[in-house]
Amino acid sequence: MKHHNDSKAEVTLIGFVDPLDDDDDNTGVKISTDEDEYIVEMNRTGKKLLNMIDEEIEATGSVSLDSTGAKIFSVTSYDYAPYDENEEDVTD
């Protein structure tokens, strides 16, 4: 897995939108990919993902680390994840 030091590089993630499991009163979501979890920054576009919980999406934006080392994803655009017709058909 590659690690990029440039936190402003644009990346595209494909994953599921999940509610944020925070103990405090912050409302938010995270994007869970196969490899990691990214806390969505609650900017204008990020707030729209509150309506996409349990959906698989393809999101573009930038990743930065907060003071605890958590990955913060600033979403600039998103859409439903492209459907892979071969994904479900894994029968011999």
Image (cartoon, rainbow, N blue to C red):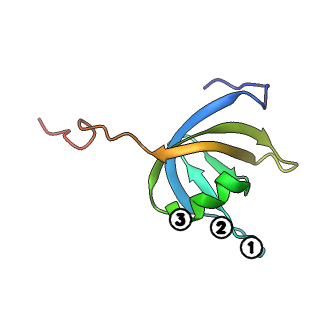
The residue at 74%/47% (across/down) is 72
- Which disc is residue 92 wearing? none
Quarter of the picture containing the C terminus is top left
Residue 40 at x, y percent in the picture: 68, 53
Q: Kindly identify which residue carries mark 3.
A: 51
Helix, strand or loop at disc 1?
A: loop
The residue at 44%/57% (across/down) is 55
Residue 25 at x, y percent in the picture: 77, 76
Helix, strand or loop at disc 3?
A: helix
Q: Amino acid at mark 3?
A: Asn
The CA distance from mark 2 to mark 3 is 16 Å
Kindly check if marks 2 and 1 are in contact, taking CB atoms under 8 A apart as contact.
Answer: no
Question: In this view, which residue lies farthest toward the left?
Answer: 92
The CA distance from mark 1 to mark 3 is 21 Å
Location of residue 49 by image quarter: bottom right
The residue at 78%/31% (across/down) is 7
Q: Amino acid at mark 2?
A: Asp
Question: In this image, 55 relative to 87: left or right?
Answer: right
Q: Kindly identify which residue carries mark 2.
A: 21
Q: Is residue 47 above or below residue 15?
A: below
- Which disc is residue 23 wearing? 1
- Label 1: few (<14), some or many (≥20) within 10 Å? few
Q: Is residue 45 above or below residue 54?
A: above
Helix, strand or loop at disc 2?
A: loop
Kindly check if marks 2 and 3 are in contact, taking CB atoms under 8 A apart as contact.
Answer: no
Q: Is residue 77 above or below residue 54?
A: above
